[in-house]
Amino acid sequence: MAARLPSWAWVSGLTAGATAAVVFLAVQAEHGPHPTAAKARPSASASASAGAHVPAKPKPSGPPALPEGSGTGRRIVYSLGEKRVWLVDATGNAGRTFTVWPGTVSPQPGRYSVTLRIQSLKGSDGVEIEHIMYFTKVSGVNIAFSNALDGASPPPANGKKLGGIRMHKEDGAALWAYGDQGTKVTVVK
């Protein structure tokens, strides 16, 4: 009668074999060709299921289009849903667009104008900010565009009511150069 191996021995042997196989494949991959920036990377959805063909999503061509119904003329357009701003010239062309980090209090969709510009100050969240452009107030909370002095994204709000719409430092500088007091601001869904 043959001796039977305990289950822990089988599990240990299979685990050791699997570990050896992974190490072997990792070493082989290290010696193979490496992708460069010029080569396309496989999408996460394509590699999610082995053997299944999942078509890659087409990359959008250029920046997102200016939202419909955002007005006419020279203006700043802010999309609540897309968390994005467009700087639109007098002919209706968006010369620049960029993403933003909204605060915890959002303006209602509508038409506004820049009412006050302040070069720099400490935000209500304690962060040093610059290029502050106020355009409305919601329930006592000022709503304004700004960027952190150090270029960082805002930390979590921790329950505070904040109306700052933050952006990257270079986008804050571009918005500051673009919008004077009285510049139209259109907020869309």
Image (cartoon, grey):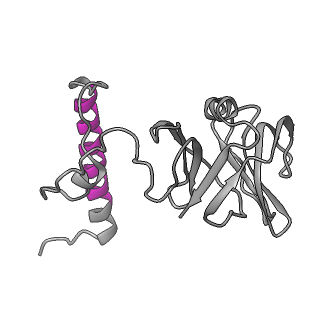
Hey, which quadrant is residue 112 in on the image? bottom right
Q: Is residue 14 magenta?
A: yes
Magenta residues?
Answer: 12-30
Q: Position of residue 37 (x, y in %)?
A: 31, 25
Q: Position of residue 2 (x, y in %)?
A: 13, 71
User: 104 or 50: which is nearer to us?
Assistant: 104
User: 116 or 98: which is nearer to us?
Assistant: 116
Q: Position of residue 149 (x, y in %)?
A: 77, 32
User: 41 or 77: which is nearer to us?
Assistant: 77
Q: What residue is drawn where x is 52% and y is 54%?
A: 71
Number of numbered discs on residues = 0
Q: What residue is drawn where x is 86% and y is 52%?
A: 124
Residue 19 located left or right of residue 114: left
Residue 185 located left or right of residue 134: left
Q: Position of residue 89 (x, y in %)?
A: 52, 36
Q: Predominant secondary structure in magenta?
A: helix
Position of 55 relative to 7 (above/below): above
Q: Is residue 97 magenta?
A: no
Assign the N terminus to one quadrant of the image: bottom left
Q: What residue is drawn where x is 70% and y is 33%?
A: 176
Q: What residue is drawn where x is 24% and y is 24%?
A: 31
Residue 36 located left or right of residue 92: left
User: 92 or 10: which is nearer to us?
Assistant: 92
Position of 161 relative to 120 (above/below): below
